[in-house]
Structures are given as C-alpha cells and as structure tokens.
Amino acid sequence: MSRHSLSIVIVNYNVKDFLLSCLASIYRHCVNIKDYQIIVVDNNSNDGSVEAVKKEYPDTTVIANHFNAGFSGGNNQGIEKSDGKYIFLLNPDTELTDDAIRKMVSHLDNNPNSWMLAPKLLNSDGSIQVSVWKQPSVFYVFLETLFLHTLFRCGSYKKKHADKSFAAGTASGAALMFRKELPGIIGLLDTNLFWMDDTEFCYRAWKKGLGPLYFPEAAIIHHSGKSSRKNPRVAISNQVISKIKFFRKHGNKIEYILASILSLLHIITRIIIFSCLSVSGGMYRAKAKAYIYTLKKYARYQLFSDESIL
C-alpha cells in the first residue's frame, strides 16, 4: 500500500543552486498534490548541496552518498526508498513553471493503461528541447560518427509533433513519471549504462508494452547538462561506450560488432579534430583530452570487460 500519492526522486551532483531552484519550484507548484514526498540522492557533492537542502527544505528526504553512484545508481536508491503510487525522476537542473506534475498525476489516475509519462521539456529560453526519440539503431551510430545525425535526424521525431501526445520509443530521464510497479516488472535502471540508462530503461518498458507516452500538456524547463559540464571526460566516455553496451545487451552479434567499430572511429576522428582545433582555445583542448580518455576506456572495456562508468 502506497503511503504517498507521489515520490519525486532527484539525483544531485555539485549543482546546489540549480537543485535549490528546482526544489523551490516543486513546493511552489505542487500545492494541488496531496501527500507527496521528495527524495534527494546526493552523489558526494562538495559544494554544500546536502547541508543547504537540509537547512532550507527539512521535510526533504536526503540520501547523502560518500561516493558517486552515477545517475542510474542514484535513481535506483531513490526508487527503492520511494513509497508513492507514482515515481517521478527529475533532474536537479529542471524547474516547474505551472501545475505540470498535477496534470501528469491526473492522467495516470484516469488512464490505467498508461504506465510512463514524458512531459515536454523546454530549454532555458523557452524553446522546445528534444526529449523523446525512436529506438536506438546502429544506423544512427553510423550517422553520428560521420557528423550526419543532425542532418538526417533519423532517431528523432519531427518538431511538428511536439504539441501532440504519442507513444514514444524512448524518453529523457530528466523528467520521467511512471507507476511504482514498473521497476518490479522490467527491473531498475542499468548501472552499467551511463547516459543511455534512461533510454535502455524505456526500451525495456517498451518491449513489455509499457513504454513512454510523450505528454506535452505538461511542460518543464530543463537547463540541460549542468552536471555533465563538471566532468566532460566522464560524460563523453559514457556517451560513446554506453551505445556499445546497449547493443551488446539488446542487439545481435553483428549490431554489437558494427557499433564497436563505429564507436572506435567516432573516438579517433574526434581526437584528431579537437586536437587540431585545440590551438584555438581551451574548450577544444578539454574535448581532445576527454576523447583520449574515452579511447583508454574503450580499450579497457573491449580488452578487459571493464564496465566502470567513472
């Protein structure tokens, strides 16, 4: 029996100011939600996040890790701690602007066949942020390697659908609401996948016929990528290698081999390009170093089955 109507799970890593703004927006816009809980899982931040939350929002449940469990591991901790009828995974760099959560809860209450909702995400300037995608494919990895993915957009839905509800293949974990029973059916987020953990979680739900519904009636601002900018090496290495892990887990042998080859080509071309551009500024130098680190992670993964995410 659920004790709360809703459990909101937020995983934080060194983005205290965004986290506090997120919490303020929840308390401001959830006045019509009865009996909800907020769980903040902090991945060993050193910016005073834990102390600030405990001081300003003492009713919030805080899980203070002494290590970085990653996005998936932190969310799994929050999910296991949750006792709400619905669970809402929410990034700390998001803000509510209206009663988006109430609309989502109301939809799930009135539509028992809906299991997972993905709201419309907005960029900081109010423009629409791409937040739902088709199922992953090796062809998209090929296009991304050749810098053609933005031209063909084969993995994305057309922007004209941004204001219509539809069954999506996968959705961003920045804001994702689902029934509490779902993890018991498909399992928790895969901690070996970082930056594709939300995609893979949705994929498993989709295979069971419980995949995400894009729900644009609810809109949430997402100041994207604030945590990832703190550590580009971890972000980039996992963005690349998690694709290989996905096809190893869910694809056939040919798809896995092709994804591995294309990802290696992706890494090498970026090292060359960003190394050449590094004379222009520190941003390119940092990306070149991140891809060199990614090449080392790739080698350890392929040679020694090292699936570490950090």
Image (tube, rainbow, N blue to C red):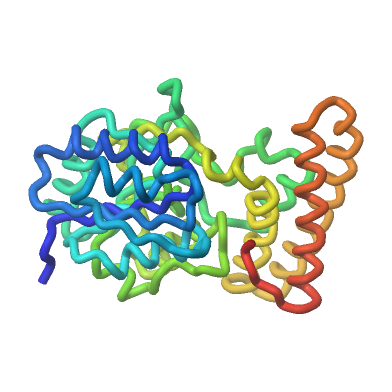
Image quadrant occupied by the N terminus? bottom left
Q: Residue shown at 85%/25% (left/top)? A: 280
Is residue 93 visible to the viewer in this orientation of the structure? Answer: yes
x, y percent for residue 191: 51, 68
Location of residue 225 by image quarter: top right
Q: Position of residue 22 (x, y in %)?
A: 33, 38
Q: 128 or 231: nearer the eye?
A: 231
Farthest residue, direction bottom: 304
Residue placed most toward the observer, 69 or 269: 69
Left or right: where 56 falls relative to 35: right
Count of marks, rendered view: 0
| Image quadrant assignment for residue 160 | top left
Q: Is residue 281 above or below residue 250?
A: above
Q: Position of residue 129 (x, y in %)?
A: 47, 33
Residue 139 visible in the displayed image: no
Q: Position of residue 222 (x, y in %)?
A: 42, 35
Task: Identify the residue at image location x=27%, y=52%.
Answer: 8
Residue 155 versus residue 122 in the image, above or below: below
